[in-house]
Amino acid sequence: MSAFIDFYFDFASPYSYVAAHMIEEIAERHKRSVIWHPVVIGNAFKAVGGAPMQTLPLRNEYVEKDVARLARYLGLPYEHPSSYPVPTQAAACAFLWGQDRDPERAKEFARKVFAAYFVEDRNIADLDVILEIIESFGLERAAAHEALNSAPLKDRLKAETDLAMARGVFSAPFFIVDGEPFWGYSRLPILEKWLADGPF
Amino acid sequence: MSAFIDFYFDFASPYSYVAAHMIEEIAERHKRSVIWHPVVIGNAFKAVGGAPMQTLPLRNEYVEKDVARLARYLGLPYEHPSSYPVPTQAAACAFLWGQDRDPERAKEFARKVFAAYFVEDRNIADLDVILEIIESFGLERAAAHEALNSAPLKDRLKAETDLAMARGVFSAPFFIVDGEPFWGYSRLPILEKWLADGPF
């Protein structure tokens, strides 16, 4: 069996949204499976990867324009969220909770959360929004609510984030294939060459 | 006549080196001319675009790997410079000095400076290296030396940098086409769609 593709994403990262729509198809073409890893690109990442977007006026303005144009280029729906960025701990914890139950449905959940934020302009920092999406899968709201508020799940998200950084992840989207790191949606063609031809 | 493509680059930016090898061919396919603008991505840019690479350990390590891999992917020669990054004021001033005389030869000069730094591992912060490259064009070393040390040329580089930032440039490589900004080598396919089909 070939090694997995590790896909690191932040639910408030527009380029993660774009990558989430592309990575499964690429993996399928090369008979690989993808493991999705939600990370929260926050304070811990500042020291290793860069300042948060919102403090960089020119870059921030550019990114907003670039993402909308990129979505048009790729034919993806996109509306810049009215609150941007937002904390993504709740969404990330919900994903991990769901992933333990069914990794493939958790991916569907992730796509719904991305759409809620980047298409429907819903505030995914709001726990009620996350619980509503969970309910749309026929899962019980009360059980989900209890799990999302539990210390073990929050601790796990922190540990997952530490592990990501230990593997060299400093931003999102980020991919690791056969130990090789790829940062950003824009490196997907190079990742695909790697999958097709092996190391180069 | 169609509008020019403005190409902003820093001589110590490996992605600028990559872009410098691609932009003229793209422009030619769409009958556009390219104006090259050297900028020095330094302190002034920190506030608008991001922290300098060398302070971000994980990102720095990744970029070194990514550039080498990208060069192999594109078939470009590349060796990571033993001093990286280096100040590029002298190279940028020399470019501006040459551009006033012959814009097309100045582009050749730029390619030679990029090759000196990213292929031959020469220190382009060293004025002697720059003067040697100028001499290889049959220009007089003494005249070039005098011009490069002159206050007007240094002031001009500062003004060019301020102008770039006023136009929204916060990093390199950066392109502006018909007022539309494109950041990074990776947006060249989207820039090319813009040239081919107009605004989208």
Image: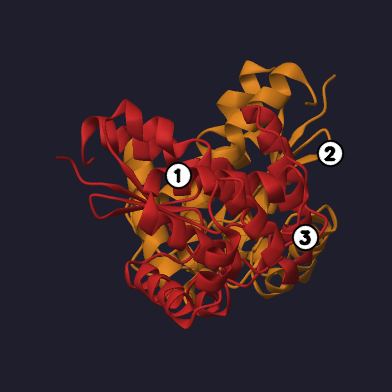
Chain colours: A orange, B red
Q: Name the element at disc 3.
A: helix
Chain for disc number 3: B
Q: Residue at x 62, y 17 (%)?
A: A29
Q: Is residue A124 left or right of residue B71?
A: left
Q: Is residue B189 left or right of residue B130?
A: left
Q: Are callouts 2 and 1 both on one chain?
A: no
The answer to which image quadrant residue A155 occupies is bottom right
C-alpha span from label 3 to label 2? 15 Å
Chain-order first, disc 3 or disc 1 = 3
Q: What kind of residue is marked 2? A: Gly
| x then y, percent, for residue B198 | 21, 37
Q: Nearer the viewer, mark 3 or mark 1?
A: 1
Q: What kind of residue is marked 1? A: Arg
Q: Residue at x 64, y 33 (%)?
A: A104
Q: Is residue A75 left or right of residue B174?
A: left
The image shows residue B153, relative to residue B144, as above or below, that is below
Task: Report the residue marked by disc 1.
Answer: B105
Q: Which mark is residue A179?
A: 2
- Which quadrant holds the C terminus of chain B? top left
Q: What kind of residue is marked 3? A: Leu
Q: Residue at x 80, y 26 (%)?
A: A199
Within 10 Å of disc 3 (Cα), the crowding (few <14, some 14-19, many 20+) is many
Task: Report the residue marked by disc 3.
Answer: B58
Q: Are callouts 3 and 1 both on one chain?
A: yes
The answer to whether residue A117 is visible is no
| x then y, percent, for residue B156 | 41, 75
Foreground of the two, A113 or B77:
B77
Contact between marks 3 and 2 (CB within 8 A): the answer is no
